[in-house]
Image (cartoon, grey):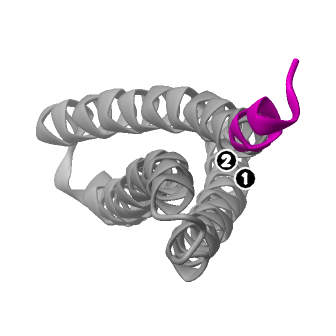
Amino acid sequence: MSPSDAPHYQVLTSLLAPALLMAATGSLLVSANNRLARVVDRLRWLVARRTSQPAHLHADLDRQIGRHRRRSRYVLHACVLLYSAVGAFVGTSLGLAVDAFSGFRLPVLPTMLAIAGVLCLMAACLYLGLEVSLAVHGFDEELDLDMARRPD
């Protein structure tokens, strides 16, 4: 390796960080999409159950349906943010390459894209945390309702 090759290897090495962040974000995205699919399936089941239940049970089902709708919105927001994060991390890689080709005159470009990606990732994690909290709260309520309906 000649001394003139060193900047090229530094640029290639710097491209690894966004790639690792893309992989981590992709993993969260797969998980979030699976959660969304489960929430939608459960929501469809609740709506179908509501149509076959007597009217006096609709209030409990309506509350569960409302909670699952909120859960689906939380996961949807998380997915959009995760896709945005992936885009920002891809942009970071491209920004690093553009910065290198411009003679390192644009260091703010990849930095700002990386910050945007990390902020999107953090916000998505907050939405996923809200969704999980809502899921556990809903599960507790459903258990309480089932236990109250069962004869001793």
Q: Secondary structure at mark 2?
A: helix
Q: Main secondary structure of the magenta part?
A: helix
Q: Foreground mark, 1 or 2?
A: 1
Q: Secondary structure at mark 1?
A: helix
Q: Is 44 displayed left or right of 5 in the figure?
A: left
Task: Report the front residue among 50 and 32.
Answer: 32
- Number of callouts in the render? 2
Q: What amino acid type is highlighted by mark number 1? A: Val
Q: Is 124 displayed left or right of 129 in the figure?
A: left
Q: Which mark is residue 139?
A: 2
Q: Are marks 1 and 2 in contact (CB under 8 Å)?
A: yes
Which residue lies at the image location 53% right of the left edge and 56% below the top edge? 92
Task: Report the front residue among 52 and 47.
Answer: 47
Q: What amino acid type is highlighted by mark number 2? A: Phe
Q: Is residue 152 visible?
A: no
Task: Report the front residue among 78 and 121.
Answer: 121
In this figure, which residue is indicated by the disc labeled 1?
136
Location of the N terminus by quadrant is top right
Tell me which segment is drawn in magenta. Answer: 1-11
In which image quadrant can residue 126 be found?
bottom right
